[in-house]
Image (spheres, helix red, strand yellow):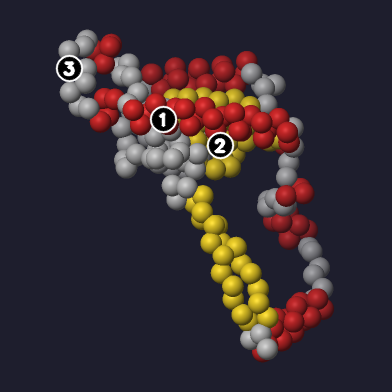
Amino acid sequence: MGTNFEFKCYFIEDKFCEKRKILALLQEHLDIIRKTKNELAKVKLEWTETDQREASKFWTIDKRPLVRQTLYLVRHAEKLDIIDKSWGNDKNELEREDSPLSALGLRQADELGKCALVIIEIERRKRQRSANDRDFVMLQTIRHILQNNEKAENLVLVSHLSNIGLLLQRMGVEWVAMGQASITNLIRYEENIGNSPDLLQQFRMEFASEIGHLTERADYIFGV
C-alpha cells in the first residue's frame, strides 16, 4: 500500500499560478524516510566558536534583525518615445526628455499605484553607466533624501534605469536588469546602521526587478 502526499508547486510568470500534483510513495520509500529521520534524531551537534560565527551570518525568520527602513526602487512605466521613435521630432531637446506614457505605460502606472497601496497596507499591518558629475549629483540627492527621511519606515523612489543601476552599484548590490514598472526592494536593518558611514552601504537587497503586480509586461528591458 502506498500513501498519498499532496505537493503544492507555485511559480510566477505573468500571473500567479498554482499547480497541485498527487504523488503516491511506495511503502519501501516511506520506510527509508522513517529510518533516515530516526538516524538523524540520534545525531548530536557540537558547535565550535567558528561554527557559531559562520552560522550567525545566516538569518532565520525568528532571528531576522530589526528593520529600520525599507526602500523601494521603482522604474518608471513604458514611455511613448520607446515604442514610437518618431515622437518628439517636432519638439526641442528639453521637451523630448519629457515623453508621456504609452497606453501600456498608463496601465503599468495604474498597477504600480495599486501595488503601492498593497505594500503600504502590508507594512502598516506588520509594523550601469560610468559615473560622472551628474551621477555625483544624483547620488548626493539620494543621500539627502535618505538623511531627511531617516525615521520614515518606507520610501518609494521612482527613477530611470541608469539611475537605479548606478544606485544599486554604489550600494554594493550586484547589477540586475530592471524591467519597465518593476520594483526592487532594499532593507536597512537596525544592526547595519553603524557598520558603514555611508547611508547607501547600509541597505541589503530583499528582491529585485519584481513584476508580479503587472498584468502585461514589455518584451524589452533596456531603454531609459
- Distance (Cα) linking label 3 and label 2: 37 Å
Q: Is residue 139 left or right of residue 196?
A: left
Along the line of sight, which residue is nearer the eye, 139 or 69?
69
Q: Amino acid at mark 3?
A: Asn
Q: Secondary structure at mark 2?
A: strand
Tell me the residue at 61%/33% (across/down). Answer: 119
Q: Amino acid at mark 2?
A: Asn
Q: Label 1 belongs to which residue?
A: 107
Residue 185: mark in rendering: 2
Q: Label 3 belongs to which residue?
A: 89
Nearer the observer: mark 1 or 2; the answer is 1
Q: Amino acid at mark 1?
A: Arg
State the quadrant of the N terminus: bottom right
Choose top left, top right, bottom left or bottom right for residue 35. Answer: bottom right
Where in the figure is residue 142, as x and y percent of width and height? 52, 21
Whether 22 is drawn above or below 173: the answer is below
- Distance (Cα) linking label 1 and label 2: 22 Å
Q: Are marks 3 and 2 in contact (CB under 8 Å)?
A: no
Where in the figure is residue 62, as x and y percent of width and height? 77, 49
Nearer the observer: mark 3 or 2; the answer is 3
Q: Is residue 182 left or right of residue 200?
A: left
